[in-house]
Structures are given as structure tokens and as C-alpha cells.
Image: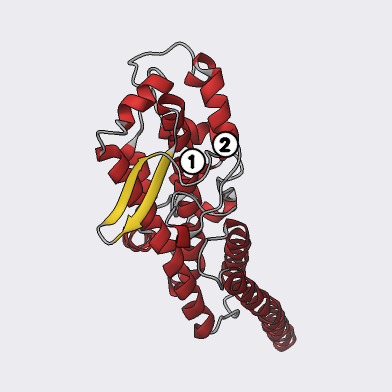
Amino acid sequence: MVAQAAGTLGLWWETRQQRLLDEATREELRRIPWLADMIARWSVAHRAGNQLDLRVSEYLAREARATMDSLVANKRVSAPQSVLYELDIVRDTFRGFRELFLVQFEQAAQSSEIDLQGAVRRAVPGAKLDMDFVRRLGLDPAIEWSEHVRAKGNQGFDADLADALRHSSVFISRLFPSTELAIHEPIAAQQPGVIQRLVGAIAGALPMPRSEDHRPDVGERRDAFREFLLLPAEVARVKALHAAWLATSAVVGETHGAPLAVTVDASGVQVGLGSLDPMPQLGHSPATDLSDRQLGAVEQ
């Protein structure tokens, strides 16, 4: 009876291992080609090299997250290093835009012509532009991930940022927090015109991270395939900075009658008032042609 029980247990274990191996094989045969296809589509969309398409980028980020889910759910699933390398190359593009947006905000904040904080106060009384929040969006997710792994915290990676990005009204309140010591009603209720238009302007520009993406994830396996996490993190930051720039430009336009305009020349990034093209309407995301030197937004 003991021998029979041991044999039954061994047969169950062998069957289970074979099932997990079959599941891993099926996942690899699906996920890797799907991801490779999205990388190829992303490359085709950016072949001209003059704009960043956030729509195809969001789908690529979703595919990368789904692949990470498979890698974590079944340890027998693996991914070729060539795919990780290609994801890292794609991430370089978002790293450049993230850094560019951060430079734009810093230049605008230092410009006496724009008077950024004064423009915000006049358009949305009792509020300010939170540059610390903008700088938080501009942080390198690779550095944050390394610190997250070393700290072995219980909170999921980028969980606080995900909460800020989940709803456009929450995002606006983080971007333009109240300066009052005590308020009896939210800013949105005090300034329905401007705030509601800002919420409408960035509603389509914000990323919508899933809550399950931000569960505790400091395991060694996630770190081994961290490119599948870092690419969606870069995409989310660029989309958030894009939304923040749209909202800030709209506030400046409310005060000065002209939005923020960005040019790049031999001396570096220049931010001022006015636009190379007619001012876009709130709620629309203008496409940016880098060849025309107008780098204030990216294509939805």
C-alpha cells in the first residue's frame, strides 16, 4: 500500500510537471511572437523618426506587461535576450522624451516672460503648479526599480504613481494642488470652467494602469526580466508628462492668450509664448513634428 501510494504520488508529480511544461511552451509560442509583432509595428510607426505615436506605444506596453505576467505565473516560461534588447532600444526613445519634457518644464518655470506660477494663480486662484510632482514623473524608472528591489518593500512598483494617473481629476489636483490652508470645497467646484476643460484636455492623454500591475513585485524573476516592467513605466511617464504639459500650456494660454511653444536649436531647448501652429483646442492632443522644431507634444 505504501509503494502504491508512493507510485501514485510520483505519477501525479510527473503529470503536473509535464502540464506546467506544456503550459510554458504554449505561452512562449504565443507571447513572444505577439510581443515581437508589436515591436515591429511600433518600429514601422516610427520609421520617419519625426514624432512619437502614443497609441501604438500603449499597446506595446500592454503586451510587455502581459508577457511579464506569464513569466511570473509560470517559471518555466522564458524570453529570449534578443527581445529584451529590442525593448531596451525602444525604451531609449521614451527616455529621451521624458528628459525633454522635464527640461521644458524647468525652462518654463525659470522664464520671467511666462511667469508660470503667476499664470497658474491667475487662471486657477488658490492653486499652484507642483514642480515636485512633475520632477517625480521625470525620474528614471530604472533607478526607482533598483531602489525598490533593494528596499524589498511591500508596496508594488509605481503604485503611488498609478493612483495619481488613474483619474484625470486626481491628476489635475496633484499637478495643481491648492495653496490654501483649509478649503471647504474642491478646486474643481470653485473653478468649473478652467478645471473641467483641463480634465477634458488630458482625459485621453493619461495612461490607465491596471491595479494588478502594481502588486508587490520585488522577486528575482521580475528583476531578471525587468525590461518588461521598465518599458511600460517609461510609456506611462511620457504620457503623464505629455498630459501635464497640455494642461500647463492650457493654463498659460488662459492667462496670456497664447500657449507654450518649444523650439530646439544649437543653444538647447527654448520655451516661450506663442506657437508655430494655431493654438490647439482644449481636449485635442496636437501632433508634434520634430523636423519643425515644435516639441511640446506628441501624437496620440
- Closer to us: 236 or 149: 236
- Residue 280 visible to an observer of this rendering: yes
Relative to 212, residue 176 above or below? above
Of the numbered discs in the image, which one, if any, rests on residue 201?
2
**Marks 2 and 1, the one that precedes in the sequence:** 2
Give residue 17's position: percent from left, percent from top. 67, 83
User: Element at badge 2?
Assistant: helix
10 left or right of 235?
Answer: right
- Kindly indicate the quadrant of the structure image that contains residue 124: top left
Relative to 149, residue 288 above or below? above
* Residues at circles 2 and 1 in contact by the CB criterion of under 8 Å: yes
Quarter of the image where the N terminus is located: bottom right
Three-letter amino acid code at disc 1? Leu
Relative to 95, residue 189 above or below? above
Which residue matches tag 1?
246
- Residue 152 visible to an observer of this rendering: no
Q: Residues within 10 Å of mark 2 (few under 14, many from 20)?
A: many
Number of numbered callouts drawn: 2
Give residue 77's position: percent from left, percent from top. 60, 79
